[in-house]
Image (cartoon, helix red, strand yellow):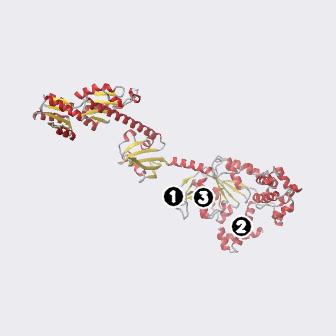
Amino acid sequence: MIQAASRYPLSTQPTDPSQRPRIWAVGISRLRDLFFDISGEYDGRANLRVVSVGFEEAVREIVAAGEARPDVVVAGGSNGAYLKTRATVPVVQINPTGFDVMHALARARRDAASVALVTHGETPEEVRRFTAAYGIDVVFASYQSAQDAESCVLDLRDRGVEAVVGPGLVTDLAARAGMAAVFLYSRASVRAAFDTALDVAQATRGEAVRRQRLDNLLQHMRDGVVALDAQGRVEAINQRLATVLGIDTANAVGRPLIELAPDIADALPDADGDAPGSVRGVSYVVHRGPLAGNGAAAGTVLTFQESRAVERLDRTLRSRQRAQQFTARYRLDDLVGECAQIERVRTLVRRYAKSDATVLILGESGTGKEMVAQSMHHLSARRDFAFVAINCGAFPEALLESELFGYEEGAFTGARKGGKAGLIEAAHRGTLFLDEIGEMPLPLQSRLLRVLQEREVVRLGSTEPTRVDIRVVAATHRALTEGVEAGTFRADLFYRLNILSIALPPLRERPADLMPLASELLLQAARRESRLAARIRNANDAARVLDGISDPLRRYTWPGNVRELQNVIERIAVELADVDTDDGGDGALTRDVLRTIAPELFEPFARGQKEALTLRERSRHVEADEIRAALAACSGDRDAVCKALGISKTTLWRKLNAAHQTQ
């Protein structure tokens, strides 16, 4: 006979007995004996145990087995039906085949004239049709419990039935009642039940392994996760969230989450998506999503991520994204000069780079304020992060606000979809350089003051602040104290900015640095101009070329400072590039040529200015120039000038008097 073992190749059978499926065959009397007869056929494929108790005793034995409980139970008749509703493990019931019924009825008819077929539950309709088709006279009866079985057998005896066909419990009762009894189950039906049990055990173990892997995945997640069924009962929860909620994971499965943690109700989103929430005083970003099952939502998955972790990740991402966009090009070595004032500036830059305090850089336009700010950034602990610079006088107020603070989607007409991070956010963990801070409108000064105080920024159209970690460096050519007195600059912002201060000397106050600086600028220009590269290879070559025009360069007071000097040197470089030394020229620049390309160096007022001015005097000169330019632009309309400059008529009158005195 070919046994059912052929369904399972030997190569797939576990060699370790502890890894084989555990199958318990639960039966009494004749079914138990049949189990013993067949059990040897399954050696090597399963750990098969025959349990000679039934009903409640079998349930208690399964529970008492603990971790050694069976993977599957095999039972028949009412015993199998009872275990199926009460056991905590899968139960495979033995189902007699049509051949089993026919064979058992034939045996019973040989010994008795009147035969009854007794089954657990309703008699299958196909059995009734089978007996009717072959003209077999059979009495059909059924039972639900052991007590029903005994009553059923006694009733059949009283009705004159001589032989009973049925499962083990019924045949035992019939034999005790003096009736002939034929056991319904065959070896084939029991083998089929065992084979099904093996399939169920393998599937159950595979599912258990998958569940264990998913559970391990949940436990290793940094966020709290819980899966709920359609009724809100816990299907799975990781230890991180269980610890936060103060619940036991072992007892959580199957119970409503709201019942386990009533205080979590307010933190749960009403719809799928992300929402802020608070659990036991800790802020979380709670994500709600569907738990899919058979193509439809069968529950909910909730993920709890600490807000602090989101902020840390956001800061890291922002820093990485902006590191390449905003970089500092200048270093302290790029600051040319050997005079005492420049040495003092270098000393302060090195000293202040060690601090995170706000720095205010003072100096006329063109003295190198941004170069100093970039040098300080390069020497600081923030060197690996962004250096973001913005000129506060280069934008209209509305545009400056959106550039600095950013905006949310829909904050104003034309706002970019998805919103935009401002430059303050872009400088996160780096340095924010606010050039010409004195030009910032008063309303924005208030918002900037809050950023400096609270280290958080609120985008236009938003109510949620974003934490920022920035070092602020501001620069101005104005005397901010005068702005404070005139009401155009907030006093509290001035004191918040003026913690550390660096004053840059104008070029006219460092005459010894003029020619070395001019030579360095010419060398840089020659590197950009291929026609000059061969003639000016180093600073000595540049100094030789400039030697013939050094006198007018030194006598000029350079109101535009290094920026103006750089412009003049660029003109010189262009002129030198067109000089053909092959025609007998030495490539030197003459005073006449310089007068042509830079006539301002020879104007009388350029030689008549004072050699040195105080910072306030320099600021007044700059203000006077701006006021004159504004009056010319507004055709002398003083109301329009006041509006353009953001000052009162009294302030304008006072500054006009000061401007007349500077002429």
Confirm or deny contact between disc 2 and disc 3 (CB under 8 A).
no
What is the distance, in whole Å, between disc 3 and disc 1 at their CAs?
16 Å
Secondary structure under badge 3? helix
Question: For the residue marked with disc 1, what is the amino acid?
Answer: Thr
In the picture, the disc for residue 404 is 3
In the picture, the disc for residue 359 is none
In the picture, the disc for residue 463 is 1
Image quadrant assignment for residue 29: top left
In this view, 148 is above or below 35:
below
Q: Do we see residue 203 in this rendering?
A: yes
What is the distance, in whole Å, between disc 2 and disc 3 at their CAs?
26 Å
Which of the two discs, 1 and 2, labels the residue nearer the N terminus? 1
The structure residue drawn at horizontal position 37% and vertical position 29%, both measured from the top left corner, is 20
The structure residue drawn at horizontal position 40% and vertical position 30%, both measured from the top left corner, is 12
Question: For the residue marked with disc 2, what is the amino acid?
Answer: Glu
Q: Position of residue 408 (x, y in %)?
A: 53, 59
Q: Which residue is mark 2?
A: 626
In this view, 158 is above or below 541:
above
Question: For the residue marked with disc 3, what is the amino acid?
Answer: Leu
